[in-house]
Amino acid sequence: MLQISDRIRIIQGDIVKMEVDAIVNAANPTLLGGGGVDGAIHRAAGPGLLEECKGLKGCATGEAKITKGYLLPAKWVIHTVGPVWQGGQKGEDNLLASCYRKSLELAREYEVRTIAFPAISTGAYNFPSERAARIAVSEIKKFIQENQLPEKVFLICFNEETCRHLKAALSESFVV
Ligand code: AR6
């Protein structure tokens, strides 16, 4: 059995290349594609993904839905909709935490052993990166402490700043 600290890994790179059971998409409520990581995932997965997404009838902020991965190395894509940052008084923290929790619950339901998350809401949706990193790490840590699956969670950073914030949040969380 892996230690909790061995079950969370930070990796710099492109999430679409991850050879994991599931990758998480930072989507919008239509689930019909967009820019950023959403655009990259749809391009790499091919048109089958959009076809399946059309049948999902959207997704509320803080919720998550699952589809197949089509041409991606990942078997599944878990689409979650992060909050748009509006200054922090509109429930953004709880909604972001909910994205991680609901995605992990779906992953557990589908017996996902390995999963990769992007830094949800920290691009087009403007959520402050350091604050988002703390929420991501604490929600993931809480979930894996209480659950066997997923066994391993990868946090993918696309830029140096995100990496720095995630690493700081992770090491802070393991200081006793
Ligand atoms: N792999 C990993 N991370 C990535 C990749 C990639 N290929 N591409 C971007 N990122 P964003 P949001 C990082 O804007 O803020 C879309 O149009 C990026 O550097 O993709 O939740 C949707 O349709 C940033 O750190 O998602 C929505 O309309 C993080 O992923 C809206 O953007 C999230 O940036 C969602 O905005």
Image: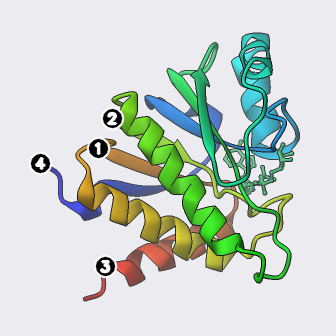
Which color scheme is applied? rainbow
| CA gap, disc 4 and disc 1 | 9 Å
- Where in the figure is residue 146, as x and y percent of width and height? 25, 57
Q: Are marks 4 and 2 in contact (CB under 8 Å)?
A: no
Q: Secondary structure at mark 1?
A: loop
> Is 108 situated left or right of 58 in this image?
left
The residue singled out by tag 3 in the image is: 174
Query: Seen from this angle, which residue lies furthest bottom?
Result: 176
| CA gap, disc 1 and disc 2 | 5 Å
Task: Give the amino acid type for the residue marked by disc 4 in the picture.
Answer: Met
| CA gap, disc 3 and disc 4 | 18 Å
Viewer-closest of 156 and 105? 105
Q: Are marks 1 and 2 in contact (CB under 8 Å)?
A: yes
Q: Secondary structure at mark 3?
A: loop
The residue singled out by tag 4 in the image is: 1
Q: Which residue corresponds to the image point at 27% horizontal and 64% vertical from the top-left? A: 5
Residue 62 sits in quarter = bottom right
Which badge, 2 or 3, comes first in the chain's sequence?
Answer: 2
Task: Give the amino acid type for the residue marked by disc 1 in the picture.
Answer: Glu
Q: Are marks 4 and 1 in contact (CB under 8 Å)?
A: no
Q: Secondary structure at mark 4?
A: loop
> Is 34 situated left or right of 148 in this image?
right
Task: Give the amino acid type for the residue marked by disc 2 in the picture.
Answer: Arg
Residue 3 sits in quarter = bottom left
Label for residue 151?
Answer: 1
Q: Are marks 2 and 3 in contact (CB under 8 Å)?
A: no
